[in-house]
């Protein structure tokens, strides 16, 4: 028994991500899929001593998993997204329409569980995209199984016939019906962009920046004209950029209310979301060459966020820690005319006017000088997932005071963009700092345009 167990674990474990992806496509729930994979391994382990190798181990495991899924689906209805329950809402100001307990929702699956290898073929990632998995739920369970085994996993008609204990002719006719039905219910294919491509990463950054900075204009730039938002757990979804923006305007709140951590789900860019420090769930983006086509918002709170291997609390210093540290640096800076023991690089003091409070606030910042002699700073905030408060302040009121050395000057803060931002940022970072590894946020670069006092 021990020899069987060790050999079975060594031979079977590499197939776990593939089996989880298959079960997820079948049942539409990552949790249910994980349970079915565990059941598959338990059944296979119990029978491994009698496994004669007439088929490959991969084929045998998929046979067990598929039949476990078919048995489970006998007791369950299809899983859906809000768009599968009716037309879009026309009034973004109305409360979301609740759904009864009879509705079973499609859930997201972390890429790390089903496509852990970065070299995974795009076709494999495409097979777990939300639109396809949602469309698969319309197929009868056996049609779904045949389609997935033949066209996603690449088993032959004879192998599928043996797995399901039907004839090869039945496999072929079932596959034909499944293809026809899928053509009826599947949405038109978009020019979906791979989540690792620069354009997809940029759109995810825009999405996160729009929420964290409460900047509706940034979100407007990121969305396609036909964009949609689905609020899973309710019957409510919105269609069209104008309607989506009206909804987003109501939920954005103030800068800093939202915090987001980039991740990947269903072969798509995604973000773990929290509001006022409370983890809410996962937003999955459908990204195309022309912008974000769909935002699917999954609730689930800290439990769902934790399943993606993400902390439900920030690992960067809290705001209170920043304030305590900064106060000590400011006192030393002013007492010693710009000389400080920490941090170990030149700093200045920047005073801004609160965007909401109107209060003057001072922070110490590292700085650099460009080729024209202009001083500039970077809003890294130790790699925190949201921009620092002083950045929001100077965007609202760009008139600032700069203390440099033993002098000071009045300046106008200019937020750089595009090539200018990248060129200046390249002077102070090679893109591999610990701060950058801690977040997917693009650090803003700000020129403090004025005339520094001599010395």
Image (cartoon, rainbow, N blue to C red):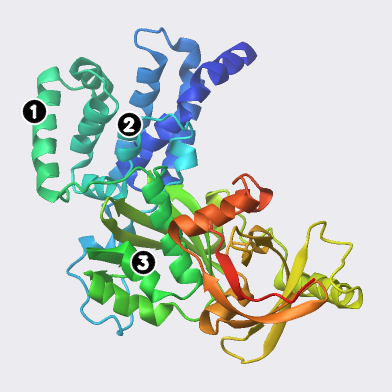
Up/down of 131 relative to 384, above or below: above
Numbered label attached to residue 173: 1
- Distance CA(mark 1)–CA(mark 2): 19 Å
Numbered label attached to residue 233: 3
Q: Position of residue 357 (x, y in %)?
A: 61, 91
> Which of the marked residues, 2 or 3, is nearer the chain's N terminus?
2
Q: Is residue 201 left or right of residue 328?
A: left
> Which of the marked residues, 1 or 2, is nearer the chain's N terminus?
2
Numbered label attached to residue 437: none
Q: Position of residue 129 (x, y in %)?
A: 31, 45
Q: Which residue is mark 2?
A: 66
Q: Quadrant of residue 125?
A: top left
> Which of the marked residues, 1 or 3, is nearer the chain's N terminus?
1
Around disc 3, counting alpha carbons within 10 Å, would you say few (fewer than 14), some (14 to 19), or many (20 or more)? many
Around disc 2, counting alpha carbons within 10 Å, would you say few (fewer than 14), some (14 to 19), or many (20 or more)? many
- Distance CA(mark 2)–CA(mark 3): 28 Å
Residue lying at 42% horizontally and 78% vertically, measured from the top left: 251
């Amino acid at each position: 028994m021990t020899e069987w167990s060790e050999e079975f674990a060594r031979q079977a474990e590499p197939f776990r991500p593939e089996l989880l992806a298959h079960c997820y496509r079948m049942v539409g729930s990552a949790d249910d899929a994980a349970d079915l994979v565990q059941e598959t391994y338990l059944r296979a382990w119990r029978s491994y001593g009698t496994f004669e190798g007439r088929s490959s181990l991969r084929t045998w495991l998929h046979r067990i998993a598929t039949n476990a899924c078919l048995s489970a689906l006998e007791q369950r209805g299809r899983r859906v997204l809000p768009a599968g329950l009716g037309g879009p809402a026309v009034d973004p100001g109305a409360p979301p329409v609740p759904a009864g307990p009879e509705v079973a929702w499609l859930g997201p699956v972390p890429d790390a569980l089903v496509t852990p290898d970065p070299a995974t073929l795009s076709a494999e990632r495409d097979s777990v995209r939300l639109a396809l998995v949602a469309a698969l739920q319309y197929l009868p369970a056996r049609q779904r199984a045949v389609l997935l085994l033949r066209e996603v996993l690449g088993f032959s008609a004879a192998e599928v016939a043996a797995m399901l204990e039907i004839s090869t002719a039945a496999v072929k006719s079932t596959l034909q019906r499944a293809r026809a039905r899928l053509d009826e219910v599947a949405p038109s294919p978009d020019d979906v962009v791979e989540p690792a491509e620069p354009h997809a990463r940029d759109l995810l950054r825009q999405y996160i920046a729009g929420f964290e900075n409460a900047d509706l204009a940034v979100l407007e730039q990121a969305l396609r004209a036909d964009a949609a938002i689905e609020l899973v757990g309710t019957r409510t979804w919105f269609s069209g950029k104008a309607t989506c923006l009206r909804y987003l305007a109501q939920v954005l709140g103030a800068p800093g209310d939202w915090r987001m951590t980039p991740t990947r789900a269903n072969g798509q860019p995604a973000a773990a979301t929290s509001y006022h420090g409370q983890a809410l769930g996962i937003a999955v983006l459908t990204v195309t060459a022309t912008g974000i086509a769909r935002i699917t918002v999954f609730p689930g709170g800290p439990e769902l966020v934790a399943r993606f291997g993400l902390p439900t609390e920030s690992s960067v210093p809290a705001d209170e820690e920043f304030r305590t540290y900064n106060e000590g640096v400011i006192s030393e800076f002013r007492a010693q005319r710009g000389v400080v023991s920490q941090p170990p690089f030149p700093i200045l003091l920047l005073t801004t006017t609160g965007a909401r409070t109107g209060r003057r606030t001072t922070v110490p910042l590292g700085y650099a000088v460009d080729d024209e002699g202009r001083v500039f700073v970077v809003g890294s905030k130790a790699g925190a997932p949201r921009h620092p408060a002083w950045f929001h302040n100077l965007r609202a009121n760009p008139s600032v005071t700069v203390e440099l050395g033993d002098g000071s000057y009045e300046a106008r803060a200019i937020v750089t963009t595009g090539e200018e931002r990248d060129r200046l940022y390249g002077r102070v970072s090679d893109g591999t700092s610990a701060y950058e590894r801690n977040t997917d946020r693009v650090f803003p670069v700000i020129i403090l345009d004025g005339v520094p006092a001599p010395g």
